[in-house]
Image (cartoon, helix red, strand yellow):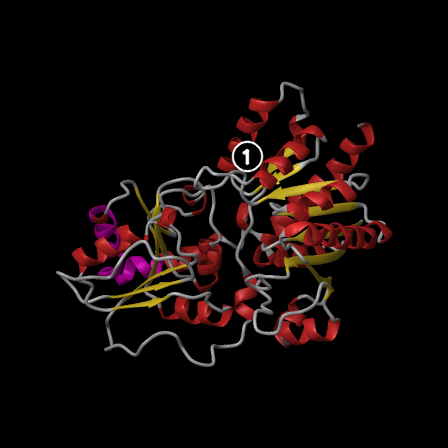
């Protein structure tokens, strides 16, 4: 079987999937697509060396990946494509041209399956149009926006998937449930139960292959002071204000250092926090690795979470996570086994959970050992995920044959 995987902003999970499919002797071609204005895929970053529209030169891409990642990807073909994604009529026409150009490349590749991952913009909608005669499979990373204000492009893509009966993979049960609720709200047509499935994604193994940060973002602390880390985009639904209030309670009983890292508009302040760092910019992959390695625990006091890539970024380093007992977190984190799930979204509850882990080294060590086991077998094993995905591809071929 020859498969094209087209991934937008999800290369951290798409690369391991492609790699493990390749290990099963499937011919895999992975395509990363990114907009001209933001050339950081969270795996490959051209922010300071922006590339022109179209396919990135192979030598430039391989140099940016580095020797270790190229070795990891040795069994698959990997290309990256830059598209305009600008505003105005001229940019729209350019988007159409580039989407057509990219689609022709895919069509000429004569793939058995074209697997689209995380599409939620105009370019992605154009791809669905130009690739309509291909045997498509779609993975939806998110179904609706956390804020409830789902973009028009996202809604059009969802409707396209429904009207055209395109098989869809979801990475969490809650995402699948949201999609089915949306489907039922706009369509009464019957569909095969085999057309929608839930398949997890696992550890972001790519983070194990990045070079160390040239300069550590972590300040030097006195030995024994635990570091509490929160990283990722700074947006209100992530509850950073809850974490800050929790740290205010904890520091009354023990010294701690808080690190909040990520770009975005602050909706909180650090008044009364004794020791902290606020790295308010887009954190590089190398810095993310350094932050996780130095952290005692990672905390995610989210108010909303259909799923999150944070656990799969942290768990390769066997670090436990404390998170809200909501959405995708409760499907990934096993309470008291690989982390702690907090029932109430308030500072007091998170303070209790954080202290529980910080003062109990035995529990933290036990969780680290459990994490190492949990994600090498069962539904979170990449080998099993690749097998389930391959099986869905085969079912997809059958479904398309009878449409």
Q: Which residues are magenta?
A: 348-366
Q: Position of residue 183 (x, y in %)?
A: 59, 27
Residue 272 position, x and y percent, is: 17, 62
Give whichever of 349, 141 is nearer the camera.
141
Q: How busy is the neighbourhood of tag 1: few (under 14 within 10 Å), some, or many (20 plus)?
A: many
Q: Residue furthest front?
A: 89
Write the residue at 32% across / 59% down: 364
Q: Quadrant of residue 275?
A: bottom left
Left or right, residue 287 beside residue 75? left
Question: Is residue 358 rendered magenta in the image?
Answer: yes
Q: Residue 286 at x, y = what percent?
A: 49, 72
Q: Position of residue 119 (x, y in %)?
A: 62, 46
Vertical comparison of 172 with 209: above or below: above
**Residue at 40%, 42% in the rendered image:** 304
Q: Residue furthest bottom?
A: 214
The residue indicated by pointer 1 is: 176
What secondary structure prevails in the magenta region? helix
Up the image or down, 68 lies above or below 367; here it is below
Q: Is residue 320 shown left or right of residue 164?
A: left
Q: Which residue sits at x=24%, y=61%?
A: 270
Q: Is residue 392 magenta?
A: no
Residue closest to the far left = 252
């Amino acid at each position: 079987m020859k498969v094209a995987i087209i991934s937008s902003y999800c290369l951290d999970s798409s690369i391991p999937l492609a790699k493990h499919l390749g290990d099963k002797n499937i011919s895999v071609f992975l395509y990363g697509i990114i907009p001209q204005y933001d050339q950081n895929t969270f795996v490959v970053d051209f922010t300071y060396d922006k590339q022109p529209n179209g396919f990135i030169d192979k030598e430039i891409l391989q140099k940016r990946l580095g020797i270790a990642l190229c070795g990891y990807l040795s069994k698959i073909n990997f290309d990256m494509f830059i598209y305009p994604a600008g505003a105005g009529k001229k940019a729209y026409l350019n988007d159409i041209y580039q989407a057509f150009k990219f689609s022709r490349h895919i069509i000429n590749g004569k793939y058995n399956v074209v697997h689209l991952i995380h599409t939620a913009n105009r370019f992605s909608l154009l791809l669905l149009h130009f690739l309509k005669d291909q045997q498509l499979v779609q993975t939806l990373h998110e179904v609706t926006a956390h804020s409830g204000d789902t973009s028009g492009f996202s809604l059009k893509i969802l409707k396209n998937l429904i009207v055209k009966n395109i098989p869809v993979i979801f990475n969490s049960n809650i995402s699948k449930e949201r999609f089915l609720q949306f489907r039922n709200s706009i369509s009464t047509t019957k569909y095969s139960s085999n057309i929608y499935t839930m398949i997890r994604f696992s550890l972001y193994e790519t983070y194990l292959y990045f070079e160390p940060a040239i300069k550590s973002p972590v300040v030097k602390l006195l030995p024994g002071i635990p570091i509490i880390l929160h990283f990722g985009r700074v947006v209100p639904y992530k509850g950073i204000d809850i974490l800050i209030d929790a740290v205010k309670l904890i520091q009354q009983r023990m010294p701690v250092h808080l690190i909040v890292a990520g770009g975005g508009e602050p909706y909180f302040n650090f008044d009364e926090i004794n020791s902290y760092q606020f790295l308010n910019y887009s954190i590089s992959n190398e810095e993310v690795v350094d932050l996780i390695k130095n952290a005692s625990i990672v905390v995610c006091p989210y108010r909303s979470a259909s799923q999150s890539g944070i656990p799969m970024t942290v768990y390769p380093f066997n670090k436990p996570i404390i998170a809200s007992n909501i959405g995708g977190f409760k499907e990934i984190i096993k309470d008291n086994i690989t982390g702690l799930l907090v029932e109430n979204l308030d500072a007091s509850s998170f303070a209790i959970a954080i202290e529980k882990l910080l003062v109990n080294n035995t529990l933290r060590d036990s969780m680290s050992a459990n994490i190492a086991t949990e994600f090498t077998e069962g539904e979170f094993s990449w080998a099993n995920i690749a097998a389930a995905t391959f099986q869905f591809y085969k079912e997809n071929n059958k479904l398309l044959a009878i449409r």
